[in-house]
Image (tube, rainbow, N blue to C red):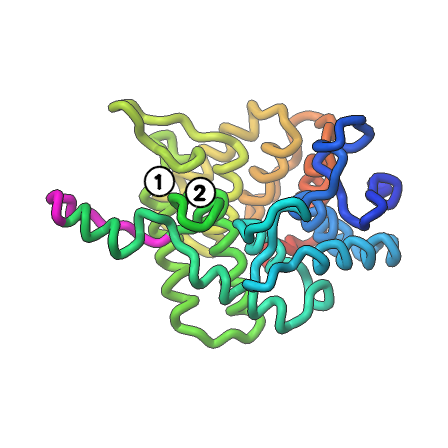
Amino acid sequence: MTDWKTRQNSDGGWAYHYGGQDANTGCSWTEPTVLVLLAQAAWQGSDGDSFARGVRFVNSIARSDGGWSPQPGVEESTWVTALVALLPEGAIGAQQRLQAIKWLKERTGQESSWSYRFQQWRNGDKQEYPEGWPWFPGAAAWVIPTSLGILAFERALRHGADDGWLRDRVQSGKKFLAGRMCADGGWNHGSSRALGRDGDSYPETTGIALLALNGDRGPQIERAKAAARKHLANCRTAEGIAWLRLGLAAHGEKAAAPVESVFRTNMDAALMSLADAPRNLLLG
């Protein structure tokens, strides 16, 4: 079990890396902090003081628009808002969670905007543009933020939100993922084809997308699971292995890590801890 307290910064958060001298790698960020908190909560054996300090750090960078920034030095809410919304009850207040969901409701990929679709229609492009989520407001949607947005909305629905619009947005996000699947059955950042060639999928994004599609069935899911198994057999990064295991577990397949991974970052350790946990807190 990782001793998270010894890796924790004085402000209560966690950096992507630990033990380094670079101020940019050693400062606290929202993404690794939330994943460490989820890992602690998943095992229910975390140091109470360490968890509480981490929660205070996360709450300290909540923004007035209802979202969260990637770290204290960034003055804009971004995709990490969806990750914060996956924290267990008690980590953030009910009102803050509602505000996070409201912020996510108002964000979509630039290509799904009315103005963009109208322009495409005028140019003869009649294809559908399902609503995904971007990394930053006003940008195009991509696989990872869309997958986390789906998980955040599904969590809200499981915990009492009765909002047909949320359900519609979840389905739209899943259509976005279906349309971005690579020819090999997995996912990359979101560009399945470029310059006339099929793009290759990546381990991390394939695992995250499979996780977001939990509960879905059909030939496309079977292709995705096959791609994930292939990636898992060859992947050597802890982050990739962890996301693949989490994605396959969401579809009933408990896969062991094929090799003993080296945890080079706090992200590596937190994600592998989540993959080993008795239940997946990312699924609420």
Q: Evaluate if marks 1 and 2 touch, with contact meaning CB atoms under 8 Å apart.
A: yes
Residue 44 in the figure: left or right of residue 82: right
Give the SS element for disc 2: helix
Q: Position of residue 243 (x, y in %)?
A: 58, 39
Determine the residue positioned at 68% across, 25% down. Answer: 259
Give residue 143's mark.
Answer: 2
Front one among 280 and 168? 168
Q: What stretch is highlighted in magenta?
A: 122-131
Determine the residue positioned at 12% across, 48% down. Answer: 122
Determine the residue positioned at 48% across, 60% down. Answer: 104
Q: How crowded is mark 2: few (under 14 residues within 10 Å), some or many (20 or more)?
A: many
Q: Position of residue 136 (x, y in %)?
A: 48, 46
Q: Can residue 202 be seen in this snapshot?
A: yes
Alpha carbons under labels 1 and 2: distance apart: 8 Å
What residue type is disc 1 on? Arg
Mark toward the start of the polypeptide (1 vs 2): 2
- Quadrant for residue 260, please give it: top right
What residue type is disc 2 on? Val
- Quadrant for residue 227, please give it: top left
How would you classify the magenta stretch by its main secondary structure?
loop
Q: Can residue 1 be seen in this snapshot?
A: no
Residue highlighted by disc 1: 180
Residue 187 in the figure: left or right of residue 73: left
Determine the residue positioned at 64% across, 72% down. Answer: 94
Q: Is residue 91 above or below residue 217?
A: below
Front one among 55 and 63? 63
Rendered-image quadrant of the C terminus? bottom right
Per the image, is 126 magenta?
yes
Give the SS element for disc 1: loop
